[in-house]
Image: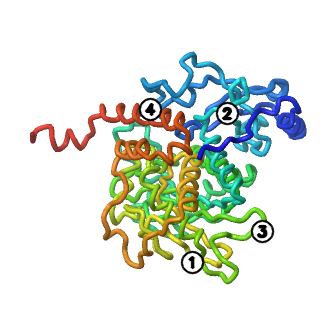
Amino acid sequence: MNAQVDSTPKEADDSRITPIREWLVQHNIDEVEGIIPDMTGIARGKIIPAAKYSEEAGLRLPEAVFMQTVTGDYPEDWSAVNPADGDIILWPDPNTIRHVPWASDPTAVIIHDCYFADGSPVELAPRYVLRKILDMYAKKGWKPVVAPELEFYLVKPNTDSDYPLEPPIGRSGRPEIGRQSFSIDAVNEFDPLFEDLYDYCERQNIGIDTLIHEAGAAQMEVNLLHGDPMELADQAFLFKRTLRESALRHKMYATFMGKPMQREPGSAMHIHQSIVDTQTGRNIFSDEDGNSTDFFKWHISGLQKYLPAAMSLFAPNVNSYRRITRYDAAPINIQWGYDNRTVGLRVPASTPEARRVENRLPGADANPYLAIAASLICGYLGMIEKEEPTEPIAGCAYEMPYELPRSLEAALEKLNACDPLKEILGKKFVTGYTAVKESELATFIQVISSWEREYLLLNV
């Protein structure tokens, strides 16, 4: 099922570099941030003078950039990369060029794709993984449409990781001490921050639809406008950085941790997804009479069948699994239902043209490229295998058994045991991703928590 993507750098015709050179001159740019998303979704790359960027045909980084863990370490298993750790070429996507609105000097940021010297793509690159699945859809005459919803917490600056996080001080001079779901006044407490955020996002073409207060103390949610999956993954990637920068300017932290505070709900990145026919532009989840189609049911069946095996891409950190808790605003299974927020797969009330599935499994800490790719892969496999989903759930799915891995270790085992997912993601990618996450897990296991000291020190 592997797809071959035409992603060779276009060095001969200079088609990517020329419009960027013109844009940099037109906007009097002094510096360029050439970035890529790594496995975690952290922006890696180089900052160089604009004049030098225009003269060079591609930046270079070591291939091992994709093997770096969130702690800054590297795994023992390097089999996914060349042992010589040679350079990869970063080739700019001209559609991603934007101003860096908070920079003191005129600065542009450009997201890059990654290739080897022979023009072949770097299979470990998250952007390539997403492009692969989009190419597979295109060959079937399908175009996915997605809309991510990102939840996050605002917290007081915390420079000592031994201390729990706390809500920040708002305009009133007081922290939020109780849950204020959907409260306008609670959002207004942070108006100066959000005014900067909206301005920064508008200047970067990040399409914010709505901003609401979620269930946790100082927990918010931003919905991005629906559109092309690669464009939306780029926007989510840039939004995280933009929000963190906005918060720092107001003496706060913004965190996308899956579960940053005990006794508070975790943060999700719900992904709404539908498919349109590239010839007609019609949503293939609805027929001409407005009824749901077989494709709609098959897509759901694929999500139900493969989401547990893809869980490590939706919950990529040891902390992620603290969010997957019964009765805590997060799904614990892969049941589905109409306008039901207790299931893993919700079908929102909509017109036939907007019929879609909301995947509620991904955490806000997930890499948006990998989470969107994995969700679309699962639905794609369902439409190829053409199996029936379970019956929709009308009641509370929290009362039903757990159907998802409860730890990163269990999730990685399921991923490596699932041949269809491994084939599409690429065996090299799965090997590298597993090595990175197992290394992070090994580092975490060495940490002795305050709970262990509190309850075990003098009692066992």
* Amino acid type, callout 2: Pro
Name the residue beneath numbered marker 1: 349
Q: Is residue 179 visible?
A: yes
Within 10 Å of disc 3 (Cα), the crowding (few <14, some 14-19, many 20+) is: few
- Of pointers 1 and 4, the one earlier in the residue sequence: 1
Q: CA distance from mark 2 to mark 3?
A: 32 Å
**Residue that protrudes farthest toward the top in the picture:** 84
Q: CA distance from mark 1 to mark 3?
A: 23 Å
Is mark 1 in CB contact (under 8 Å) with mark 4?
A: no
Please, what secondary structure does the residue beneath circle 2 have?
A: loop
* Amino acid type, callout 4: Ala
- Of pointers 2 and 3, the one earlier in the residue sequence: 2
- Of pointers 4 and 3, the one earlier in the residue sequence: 3
Task: Please name the residue shown 26% across and 40% down the image.
Answer: 450
* Rendered position, 56 above or below 448: above
Please, which colouring scheme is shown? rainbow
Q: CA distance from mark 1 to mark 4?
A: 41 Å
Name the residue beneath numbered marker 2: 121
Q: Quadrant of residue 216?
A: bottom left
- Of pointers 4 and 2, the one earlier in the residue sequence: 2
Name the residue beneath numbered marker 3: 280
* Amino acid type, callout 3: Thr
Within 10 Å of disc 4 (Cα), the crowding (few <14, some 14-19, many 20+) is: many
